[in-house]
Amino acid sequence: MDTIKRLFTTASKTYNRQMPHYALCLELVLYCHQKLRAKSEFRHYGYFSGNPRVAYGVFALDDSVSRPVRNELYLSDEATFTREHREVIALLRDRNHTWTPADYEKVNRVIYTAIMAFACCYDLWKRSSRKTPGTFFEVFMAGLLQIVFPEATFSKHIPLAAIVADDEVASEAVSEAADDGPLEIDDDDEKSSVSTDVVMGLPGKSGGIVIPLKITTRERIVQPFAHQRILDAAFGEGHYKSMIVCISETQLDDKTKSVKQVCVPGTIKLFQKHLAPTAGMYYCDVPQRYAAADMTKIVNVRSVGHLFEDIRSILAALTSQGKAD
Amino acid sequence: MDTIKRLFTTASKTYNRQMPHYALCLELVLYCHQKLRAKSEFRHYGYFSGNPRVAYGVFALDDSVSRPVRNELYLSDEATFTREHREVIALLRDRNHTWTPADYEKVNRVIYTAIMAFACCYDLWKRSSRKTPGTFFEVFMAGLLQIVFPEATFSKHIPLAAIVADDEVASEAVSEAADDGPLEIDDDDEKSSVSTDVVMGLPGKSGGIVIPLKITTRERIVQPFAHQRILDAAFGEGHYKSMIVCISETQLDDKTKSVKQVCVPGTIKLFQKHLAPTAGMYYCDVPQRYAAADMTKIVNVRSVGHLFEDIRSILAALTSQGKAD
């Protein structure tokens, strides 16, 4: 694991220095992918008993197993992964690409494989560092987005100076708020000082896209909705749009040897309606419950394969918005 | 630890069955208090370098130490604890009691000692069960509140049927939301199915008090504000009032052998103003940063000693409100 840790540290430090780091992420992914093939066994674990039912496997080593891995999303053959990755980069960079269902699936598979290869290595060989896979998800996606949208600006913070104007809180309070949040609330956690948000914009334009990245949401799902509300209060509704990007909501059930998809549809509907509306929730392994019509009529739930097309639309609107001003 | 676990299970099961359970909590507290005295050493750890600086100790056993314990709040002498506990119960039950500063401090000390005795036992002998001290905090406080306010109703849920009236979400969605939240979002966590909220009301009256209990808030601080907003949307502003009750925001700093108070004042101000206003935040060990004037003019920050008087006022207002209808 020393090599993995070293490669991860290099990639994340390079990212924090705002230097190109995607190649380092990819090197790390390939190393993890290889290590899992060489040192562990991928085997069937059980099914999510949905409609249709879904097969999940795990990487296993002696008595320990990784998180559940959805069979048809994980590209276990290295040659297939590198070929599909190459194709994905090409299609994501093509501004005039006409998307097909197969394209969305390919993008989804490649991102799922990259993140899961790293996360499952941590599950098997470094279980105590539970937060690191989530951090890698942020670092990897930031790198990919930077390559796909070279015209965009990237940051981790949104300065809240604008909130002063219509707010009786003294500027002292606001500058302080900008120091410790509100888009960095994860940083207050005792275990970590890494924000899990990527903020995209365009040079010379205000507003943009906030992308909270969470491998799985659990009780933290309230955060992006609360942050969106603060942003709406500070900058006006929809000036910033949040796109929540996740891998899955799966969980092993050891007793029944099955996989659960842990969902809170009612809670999300309430947040979307009564905290603030987000622009969408994107999953590699979309939970079946969230893909149901009662959810999608309230929240835009799609696969991560759709994320890039949707970001391109929002950035295009931001560009023309500027022209109209 | 088997005895502690057995006593805890008995107390929490009795609570969940809605039967009187406070005596069981107290038995457990005394057992923990005694075990810490007999099997560990309480020693000075370091200071929080505030103004004034604050001394903290830890319970130590071999190489492991407990969370930081504020010296002057922890009653290490059993006779003192049982005497002060008896006095606290008497004064809390006295509806006509005229509170003195010494009373607030005594209530604070007794609750702090009870919760810390249990939590520090878990720190030393059952470190893997990280969520259990938080659950005990809820179970203990619910028991104490039931004894002090026998006229009140207690529950863990607020039915959200009222949200249907002015809401385009189908009733299906609402009943579902009531199932998984929104006041039980913690339950979606993979590790636990215990809500950390107590809801107090009065028979025949709607509205009431929501009491989120958290030993320490960390990144979960957003939840009570988000819940308050949902309740405001569902029932009208202030129909339910949230009183956030915590023990402390302390953290050991192993490198410097000091104690930090982890605070996010800017974030809390933004939540209080732009999500929804809560009725107050109560701490046994009030963080100095939160007691500063810029905070207290926006959020009501007080010691847990003040909680009971404030609850009595709100319940009294609820009673007279009913008369006026």
Image (cartoon, coloured by chain):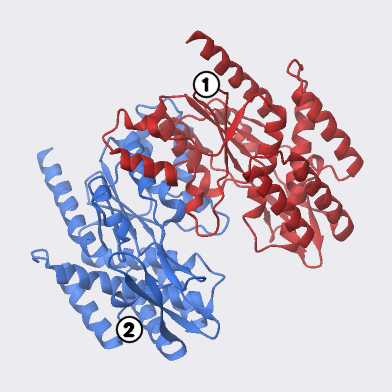
Chain colours: A blue, B red
Considering depth in this image, is A159 or A211 the residue closer to the camera?
Answer: A211
Label 1 element class: loop
Q: Is residue B284 left or right of residue A247?
A: right
Quarter holding the C terminus of chain A is: top left
Position in image of residue B296 (x %, y %) = 58, 28
Instruction: Confirm whether residue A159 shows in the render.
Output: no
Label 2 element class: loop
Q: Are marks 1 and 2 in contact (CB under 8 Å)?
A: no
Q: Residue placed at 52% from the left, 43% from the top?
A: B221
Badge 2 density bin: few <14, some 14–19, many ≥20, Cα 10 Å: some
Vertical arrangement, residue B220 with respect to residue A33, above or below: above
Position in image of residue A116 (x %, y %) = 38, 73
Q: CA distance from mark 1 to mark 2?
A: 60 Å
Q: Residue placed at 68% from the left, 40% from the top?
A: B19
Badge 1 density bin: few <14, some 14–19, many ≥20, Cα 10 Å: few
* Residue found farthest to the bottom: A38
Amino acid type, label 1: Lys
Vertical arrangement, residue A145 with respect to residue A125, above or below: above
**Chain for disc number 1:** B
Q: Residue placed at 55% from the left, 56% from the top?
A: B192
Location of mark 1 (residue) = B205
Instruction: Confirm whether residue A132 shows in the render.
Output: yes
Q: Residue placed at 75% from the left, 15% from the top?
A: B96
Considering depth in this image, is A18 or A78 the residue closer to the camera?
Answer: A78
Vertical arrangement, residue A264 with respect to residue A286, above or below: above
Location of mark 2 (residue) = A76
Residue A37 appears in which quarter of the rendering? bottom left
Vertical arrangement, residue A5 with respect to residue A170, above or below: below
Position in image of residue B151 (x %, y %) = 65, 24
Amino acid type, label 2: Ser
Considering depth in this image, is A220 or B167 the residue closer to the camera?
Answer: B167
